[in-house]
Image: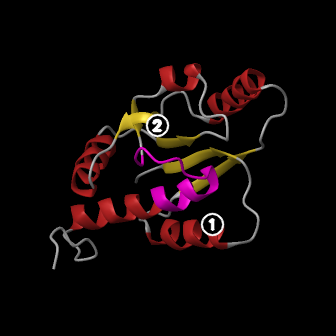
Amino acid sequence: MLDWSIVAIGRFKSGPEEALFTHHAARCRPKLGLKEIPEARGSAPEIKRREAEALLAAIPTDALVVALDQDGQTPGSADLAKLLDRWQQSGKKLRFVIGGAEGLDRSVLDRADATLSLGAMTWPHLLVRGMLAEQLFRAQSILAGHPYHRAGRP
């Protein structure tokens, strides 16, 4: 059985970002988990260092890690499905890592087995969770041959 979750900086407050994540995470099979790490305080470098320590401590040593980073791959949905299939076939625990406002420290990116980007635009890190959950559900749907994803334009 797939063991997967998002490990992210920041905590949801009740609102649309949480609702978006909850809706799509529950549709994933198995349900996509979420481990929230409190935001660190201090200067930007200190924040990144402290958050990196907490993120790395929350990731199992045998996990396959996918970091969300602005310089990561930007696959389309069908290509993400292929990546997800490959990652699942590894048999490893799968952890998607989302940094805070300062981004991810180099130590987290070095630990990552892959990096993904949701595009060149900057997104609020709390919104990224829901966007990623939707894309992971979409990728599972593509792999299952479910009609949720419409590959062509009408």
**Looking at the rendering, in which quadrant would you find the C terminus?**
bottom left
Q: Residue at x 27, y 44 (%)?
A: 83
Q: Does residue 77 appear to the left or right of 96 in the view shown?
A: left
Q: Residue furthest bottom?
A: 154
- Where residue 6 sits in the image (x, y, percent)? 55, 49
**Distance in Å between CA atoms under marks 2 and 1:** 20 Å
- Where residue 118 sits in the image (x, y, percent)? 42, 49
**68 and 28: which is toward the camera:** 68
Please give the residue where the numbered disc 2 appears in the rendered image.
Answer: 70
Please give the residue where the numbered disc 1 appears in the rendered image.
Answer: 17
- Where residue 43 sits in the image (x, y, percent)? 81, 25
Q: Which comes sooner in the sequence, label 2 or label 1?
A: 1
Let me know if residue 66 appears in the view.
Answer: no
Q: Quadrant of residue 47?
A: top right
**122 and 140: which is toward the camera:** 122
**93 and 113: which is toward the camera:** 113
Q: Secondary structure at mark 2?
A: strand
Q: Does residue 93 appear to the left or right of 59 in the view shown?
A: left
Looking at the picture, which amino acid does disc 2 mark? Gln
Q: With respect to residue 40, does 119 lie above or below?
A: below
**70 and 81: which is toward the camera:** 70
> Magenta part of the protein: which range?
118-132
Disc 1 crowd rating (10 Å Cα; few below 14, some 14-19, many 20+) is: some
Q: With respect to residue 31, does 73 lie above or below?
A: above
Q: Quadrant of residue 92?
A: top left
Disc 2 crowd rating (10 Å Cα; few below 14, some 14-19, many 20+) is: some
